[in-house]
Image: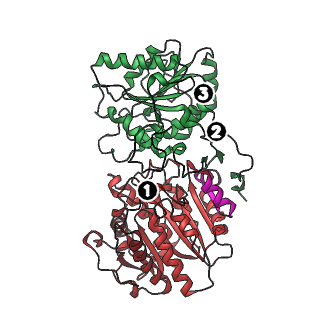
Chain colours: A green, B red
Amino acid sequence: MPLRSSPLPRMAGHLSFMRSQAKSISDVRSGDLAVIGIPFEDTGEPHAGQSLAPRALRETSVYFGWHANPQFSHPVDIDARQDISTDGLHERLCDLGDISSDNDDAIHAALKAATNQISGKGACAIILGGSDHLSKTVESALPRCQTAQLGGRLDDVRNFHIAPLPKEDGTSCSPDNSANLAAFSEWREPSKPLFVRFDLSVFETSISALCDRPRLGGCDLDTVVQWLGALGKHEVSAIMLTGLNPSRPGMGVVKVGQRLMVTALLAFIYARLGFAKDHPNRQTSKENVLV
Amino acid sequence: MNVATTLNPHLVQPGHRLFEGPLRDVADVTAGQIGVVGMPSDWTHSSRLGTRFGPDALRRATTLLQSIRPNGVSVDPDTGLRTAPVTDWLIDCGDAEITAQNVDATTEAIAGMTEALTVAGAIPLALGGDHYNSFPACLGFSRGLAKRAPNARFGYIQIDGHLDFSDQLGAWGSHNHATNARRISELPNIDVSNMVWVGITGWVDGGDLALIEEQGGRVFSAGDVHKMGAAEVMRQALEHAMKGCDELYLSIDIDAMDAGYLPGTGSIVHSGITPRQYYDLLDGLSEAPLGGLDIVEVSPPLDPSERTEFLAAEMLFRILRRYRTRPVAEQ
């Protein structure tokens, strides 16, 4: 159970992802979504601050902690007019806390061990970074996985890149999302689980000013939501969020980046848990049409 | 009831006036004029504060934008019509007295001013503040309308990223920025079936949505604005809100606009509603029988670029176009 399920201001109470239950890694079960934070950053980044991202992401996620607030009924995706039943979410979503601060080697070793342990139990790790370079450590802990990459550095041509980032051959991903989904299906080897790298730079820079490595020509929120919803239907060993710098100079008060990432991540979580469902009796947006 | 509230604490004493209008008491506002009421209060917001500085920012931004507009006859680039500025169309009545630790006192102070304006036949324009303050502004309008026209009913349109239709919100109870529309729905001269929400986005509470729609209220999402177009959405919204009603109360929550454009607000959304779409929504009310309105959730400390207050000021230029300008015959 959540430590506290009664209504609380967002700035109060225990801080866990979406107010989920705190768990020890040894208690993670198959099918769980286990959140861990890596509050560390690469000193080579142009600005300091990515180590603050796990806390910022958790703080924003509390806004979406529907399952832990008995005052609310249930969430509805207002555009799709789709009910989202979050019953049982707190049974399967848990927060393991952060990797402890130590020397560089120890941090990488701890991250690798935690990822191994979570995926070994048949659970999915939701890793809150932190710098993108830490994703190489996660990748090394998941040798069987195919890596799908939303934004971030282009460092392995075997990965599937979801964003209009230039590829090594000089071409770029098509903005046609259905074509990209078809290409993804072709690339995918169903026998292998996925590792998803989700970097803030996947978003168009004009809607996310909190990214240290901004890219023009990025995706809008709807596109990223579509992708994460689609990826969530596959077997995923880990998803890692990177690239958010909540203290980006002059932009720290805005909090756009963490809101974008958490909003999009919900599509992944709900898809993993199979929560989205149609509600045949609900008044739908078909009423709102041109007349 | 105390309606002469132009003597205020230092915090809320306006340095600028909205549209550089004269600063006078609510008793000096006459029928047909816009009477401005500042509501510098964000003590009823549950997370990101700063909207207490909203009224002053709106006053500053409208004054600045007004100063760079033509003083004489000109062509309005949005309508293509020749227009001239109107004088004496707006009176800034200063700010209501805000009592941070007393929601009831704050509510009555705001409602007292908007009530007096409505009784006089003026149009109250309330400047937030967080969205809770929309309730006292509308409460005063509702009371004033009941005195001026006892059988009159009003319709309600809320442009917003959120429904604000919760009955209670955690530690804040029943009177806060998530319950304002619910409290308005309980006023005696309005029915939920005449309440319309435009621009709602993301995940909303299913119980609140069902309660609205079961009672005949109408909700247009941000996606509806994209699919149908802003003009058509507002045409349908106005038609629905005004069924059997005499006047319209409009609540403008700036947070319906995508946070990429407008980050300086308490509860940001990524709706994708652009400034152009937002302005088109407001242009769709150019002929609406506006009885009262508010604009809320401008939080200057949350936007170092200051663009939020200028986007919000432009919203006021749009919705008040017919009051601040008059058409001039072609020569």
Task: Assess whether mark 3 and mark 1 are in contact (beta carbons under 8 angstroms).
Answer: no
Graded by Cα atoms within 10 Å as few (under 14), some (14 to 19) or many (20 or more), the crowding at tag 3 reads: some
**Dot 2 or dot 3, earlier in sequence:** 3
Residue A224 horizontal/vertical position (percent): 54, 35
Type of amino acid at the residue the image marks with label 2: Ala
The image's mark for residue A150 is: none
Q: What is the quadrant of residue A229 in the picture?
A: top right
Q: Residue at x 38, y 62 (%)?
A: B42
Graded by Cα atoms within 10 Å as few (under 14), some (14 to 19) or many (20 or more), the crowding at tag 2 reads: some
Task: Assess whether mark 3 and mark 2 are in contact (beta carbons under 8 angstroms).
Answer: no
The image's mark for residue B171 is: 1
Residue A284 horizontal/vertical position (percent): 70, 51
Location of the C terminus of chain A by quadrant is bottom right
- Residue A286 visible in the snapshot: yes
Label 1 resides on the chain identified as: B
Q: Residue at x 44, y 14 (%)?
A: A140
Label 2 resides on the chain identified as: A
The image's mark for residue A276 is: 2
Q: From what the image shows, is residue A92 above or below residue B166?
A: above
- State the CA–CA distance, disc 2 to disc 1: 30 Å
Residue closest to the eye, B143 or B288: B143
Name the residue at the left extreme.
B10
Q: What's the magenta bit mostly, secondary-structure-wise? A: helix
The magenta segment is: B207-229
Label 2: which secondary element: loop
Q: Is residue B86 left or right of residue A90?
A: left
Q: Which residue is mark 3?
A: A180
Task: Assess whether mark 1 and mark 2 are in contact (beta carbons under 8 angstroms).
Answer: no
Type of amino acid at the residue the image marks with label 3: Asn
- State the CA–CA distance, disc 1 to disc 3: 46 Å
Whether the magenta-drawn stretch holds residue A6 is answered as no
